[in-house]
Image (cartoon, helix red, strand yellow):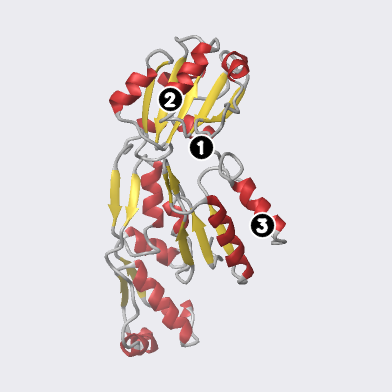
Amino acid sequence: MQEADVVIYDWLSSPDLLSLVPAHAELIYVGKRAGIHTLPQDKINQLLVEKARAGLRVVRLKGGDPFIFGRGGEEAETLAGEGIEFEVVPGITSAVAVPAYAGIPLTHREFSSSVAILTGFEEGGKKESSIDWEKISTGVGTLVFLMGVTALPRIVQQLVRHGRSPDTPVAVIQWGTTARQRTVEGTLRTIVELVNAAGLRPPAVTVVGDVVSLRRKLRWYESLPLFGKRIVVTRARGQAGRFSERLRQLGAQPLEFPVIEVLPPESWAPLDDAISRLSSFSWLIFTSANGVGFFVERLFAQGKDMRELKGVRVAAIGSETSVALGQRGLK
């Protein structure tokens, strides 16, 4: 991501990953939502080819795994046909990640020893479904449907018609793995009504099977102290990372919105003059991590090093300032 010239990204691409893109890179959104396509797939394929042939380093960013209902195979096939080299970086498919964040293991020795991942959306115009409902309904322990919220009534109907018990547990998880995650539990008999009442919409993952019952014990993510909170972080760009990561660990969704920008002074002369006379000072007091960085930069620019601080007492205001000094060998 940090070496990209162009990033072509989808609707569910992580903003955290997009923040890694260098300032000069071109960002192109080609996301698809239910019934709304920014670009048709053939145009996306063409765009990848055009940017690569222009000699640019192109990143095709997708949510989840590109080869699990992500059209990654089609796009790679196009590149291969054009003689363009590519590399695939596997991701963690939402079919696995989202249930895990909802406290639902897809396999369990007491409940299920098999899993099937299916699409809830099939291209229009098909005379017959490509899903073998008769085999899937009773032959697989856990079923995971992607892109299946709008098709939920049809999915439930097909499963029950082909032998799955109406009392089979079901969970529908919206915005899984994020602070916006919502989960509705029910059975094949009740889930459609419950989802409609809750107003769940895409993106969502549907899990069908007895493993859903384990969620009551294993719903770890929703038990985090800041789960569901959206918190604006106003620190300068490039300095919010540690704080934002801590918020994520506690279940929150940080929204980085820098309201300050750290810039060098118009003139370094006052600082350079002070550095040239360090031995005349009794105390050197740093009020911010930024100040530490600028001071050390100018110290080195004069061909000096930390030995120039001998005999000078150093103080730090704030824990982050202290950390910045420690990283440079000062305590």
- Dot placed on the residue nearer the N-terminal end, 3 or 2: 3
**Above or below: residue 297 compared with residue 205:** below
Closer to the observer: label 2 or label 1? 2
Residue 193 position, x and y percent, is 33, 19
Residue that mark 1 sits on: 94
Residue 318 position, x and y percent, is 30, 61
Q: Residue at x 37, y 28 (%)?
A: 183
Kind of residue at badge 3: Leu
Q: Residue at x 40, y 54 (%)?
A: 242
Residue that mark 3 sits on: 79
The quarter holding residue 96 reads: top right
- Dot placed on the residue nearer the N-terminal end, 3 or 1: 3
Residue 128 position, x and y percent, is 58, 26
Q: Residue at x 39, y 44 (%)?
A: 248
Secondary structure at badge 3 equals helix
Residue 252 position, x and y percent, is 34, 42
